[in-house]
Amino acid sequence: MTTSTSIAEKFESIVGTANVRAAGATDAVVGCQPEYVVSPGTEGELAAILAFANETGVAVIPRGGGTKLDWGNPPRRGGIVLSTLRLNRVLEHAWADLTVTVEAGCTVQALQNVLAQHGQRLAIDALWSDRATIGGLLSTNDSGILRLRFGGLRDLIIGVTLALPDGTLASSGGKVVKNVAGYDLPKLAAGAFGTLGVITRAVFRLHPLPWAASSITCVTDRVPAAQCLLALLLDSNLAYSALQTRFVSTSEREVSIDLLFEGTDSGREAQIARVKSLVEAVPVSEANSSVWQAREALHCEAVAASSSSVLVKMSAPPADAMNAIADLRTLCANRATFDAVVQATGLGTILLKGDAGQLRSILEGFRKRMQAAGGSLVILGDSPPTKGLDAWGDPGDAIGIMRALKKQLDPKNTLNPGRFVGGI
């Protein structure tokens, strides 16, 4: 329904007039224009706003730093944006127990700054960490390069509080690393795109900050050679914290494999020496830490060239990742170019560039290839070549369970209606 003036006045009575404003063009979510932005300052206010919206049929689009507003499908209706930016406190840093409790609107960088005071970190690599919030990070399940060693967000989160559409504040998990078995709300919320509840706070396990870090790059000129090199590195006993492969389709030396080693000086030196002995004739050079910003650079480039580009996230079984890139190269031959950054976990960010019609054809063909091999291809961003395409692709056999959960937790389809997998 359309958000009326009287409903906006009700929101103002809950959070204050200064914290309700008319939405502008920059508040659009995948092309869907909301009517108001509402910014609660407490969990209670957020729950009250959500309960009233649910009761009156107003759609709610949860938002943190707004760094991923163009991810997913367009919501079916606009309603309001529910901003968590005023919920931005680090509530408890139990540094002796290696845990932290933080509100959803706290930015990733602000949290890391607090943790660093005790030599600790949340072992993630977030896009735009100075603007991305904890709640948004969890909702999109974006953990980055450190996932290989430390696991994803579902491995790091140990507790969460969700505001459900009826206004209930539901908590699950705890503040210790080990918890009794039960309904795993933290893992359920991670990656749900705010369709089941609005995250208000989270509890994470932490890791010590590394003594120091070194990055190296191995360069090959062919995908098959890179595939052999990658298999060699993955099968070794090297203790790298991150490993990524970068592809530049217009370069003669087109494949670079980057490794990140963390620890003491002697430990890092020994690991790098081991790499050089393993790869033998392949050139190995010291790399600037900026190589780990390659994924973010592709996102920025996609924004600048939206009319002639498509940004996608590939998820492949690790053993199939290189084959997938080789097949994409074949699909693109004489029709388009692409740059890609693929993690050793099989997750990759790919920027396709070329004519809009050709890009659409390539995208559809590559998605079919990925799904047939047990992977997926998700469209990131809203660009002309992807108009009318589902952002997520085939949801697979899990869609029945996902719809049942949505119906149970959000029966009125209040939260992000239609934005997630299968139109959830």
Image: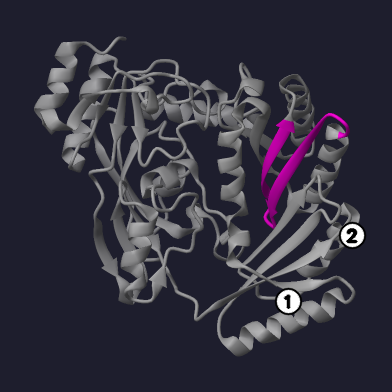
Q: Position of residue 363 (x, y in %)?
A: 74, 28
Residue 338 magenta-highlighted: yes
Residue type at mark 2: give it: Ala
Residue 292 magenta-highlighted: no
Whether residue 206 is situated above or below residue 17 in the rendered picture:
below
Q: Residue 324 versus residue 354: which sits nearer the camera?
A: 354
Assign the magenta stretch its main secondary structure: strand
Q: Position of residue 228 (x, y in %)?
A: 87, 62
Instruction: Measure the alpha-carbon separation of dots 1 and 2.
Output: 20 Å
The crowding category of the residue bearing disc 2, from other C-alpha atoms within 10 Å (few below 14, some 14 to 19, many at least 20), is few
**Which residue was labeled with disc 2?**
225
Find the magenta span and give its range.
Answer: 333-353
Image depth: mark 1 or mark 2 in front: 2
* Left or right of residue 333, residue 376 in this image: left
Residue at the (62%, 86%) spot, across then down: 267
**Which residue was labeled with disc 1?**
237
Residue at the (31%, 51%) spot, across then down: 106
